[in-house]
Amino acid sequence: MSRVYNFGAGPAMLPEPVMRRAREEFLDWGGTGVSVLEMGHRTAEFRSIAEKAEADLRALMGIPESCKVLFLHGGASPQFAMVPMNLLRGREKADYLHTGYWSGKAIAEARRFCCVNVAASGEEYGFLSIPIPERWQTDPEAAYLYYTANETITGVEFQQVPESGEVPLVADMTSNILSRPVPVERFGLIFAGAQKNISTAGLGVVIVREDLIGHLADHYPSLCDYALHAEKDSMVNTPPTYAWYLAGLTFEWLLEQGGLGEMERRNAEKAELLYKAIDDSDLYLNDVDPACRSCMNVSFRLADESLNERFLEQAREAGLVGLKGHRSLGGMRASIYNAMPLSGVRALVAFLREFERGA
Ligand SMILES: *Cc1c(COP(=O)(O)O)cnc(C)c1O
């Protein structure tokens, strides 16, 4: 068996050195004779894994002391509810930017808890562009301003961090966390499901300003309380230990690569190469506003859709898998997270050209 380039959106490719290291350590972690899979979460060994992972993430992202870092169950979606549960703090309203599928999900969930003010919507552009900040209608009484930093399905990414003034800024960074540096100090809360750019499925990472937590209403389940998770070092119950460990290996790998500035440079190079190949061709089309094209998820479609099946089949034969677009959008999508090497994008670009010649 040989490895292929996997462009799937998630669970997605992991860096090969991370998987090799996990394989080396699989049966015997650090001379203990025990696999991380079998290790008690309250042992000194797992504590050391957990603490190093947090320290490395703090170093990578420049997370200030005033923020807690939580490693929680359930990926990203539980945060659609936990954000309003915890951050409304007695307020009745929250601002949301509606830029596509994932922010739509977050809005629907938030409506169970508060009055959602959709401060801006990309709907009039078919969610292929983001309204400019001058047109946003934010509410000064909102408890927070929520946005989805990268809409994974369409491939629409904010190129700037929104200004929210005194209102805490909340971001779903599931599909672009760690892809470039971000000014964490400007956020009230950042969250990400781990299965796209961090680790394997089951883990959600939450970075939250400490002064915003501790206000959960009494009638909510205690497991929804960020403050409780912070107090118990994310070990209220058994955490997803293996996913946490793999996240730590990824953070270490990123530090070795030169950190997030270097990832930004590599990711920009990969994305430019791919968008240029699409723009230069007559067969492939990307409909996203160039001002907000994603560096992580490059969606495209074939001018002749009857070629879709043949395209996917021949791509698979060429060792390029996971290119089928999301079921809600159709077409194609190449996810090029941190783990996708430049060689994978080069191979895809060569395939795009070859397929077009034969079409
Ligand atoms: C994948 C994704 C989610 C959902 O993640 P789950 O862990 O499956 O809940 C949420 N937001 C964004 C931006 C995503 O890409």
Image (spheres, helix red, strand yellow):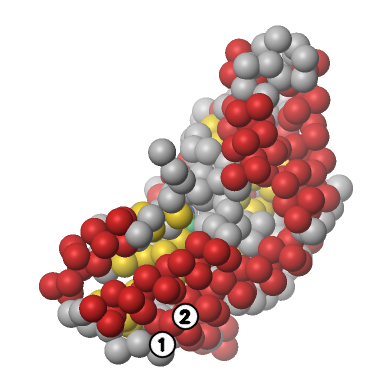
Residue type, mark 1 in image:
Asp
Residue 327 can be seen, yes or no: yes
User: For this rendering, which residue is in front, 104 or 196?
Assistant: 196
- Residue denoted by label 1: 279
Q: Give the farthest residue toward the left.
A: 306
Instruction: Tell me if residue 349 comes above or below residue 92 in the rendering.
Output: below
- Residue denoted by label 2: 275
Residue type, mark 2 in image:
Tyr
Task: Describe the element under mark 2 as helix, strand or loop.
Answer: helix
User: For this rendering, which residue is in front, 341 or 167?
Assistant: 341
Mark 2 C-beta closer than 8 Å to ligand 1: no
**How far apart, in angstroms, are the residues tagged by discs 2 and 1?**
6 Å
The quadrant of the rendering that contains the N terminus is top left
Say which quarter of the image contains residue 190: bottom right
x and y percentages locating residue 126 in the rendered image: 32, 78
Residue at image coords 31%, 62%: 315
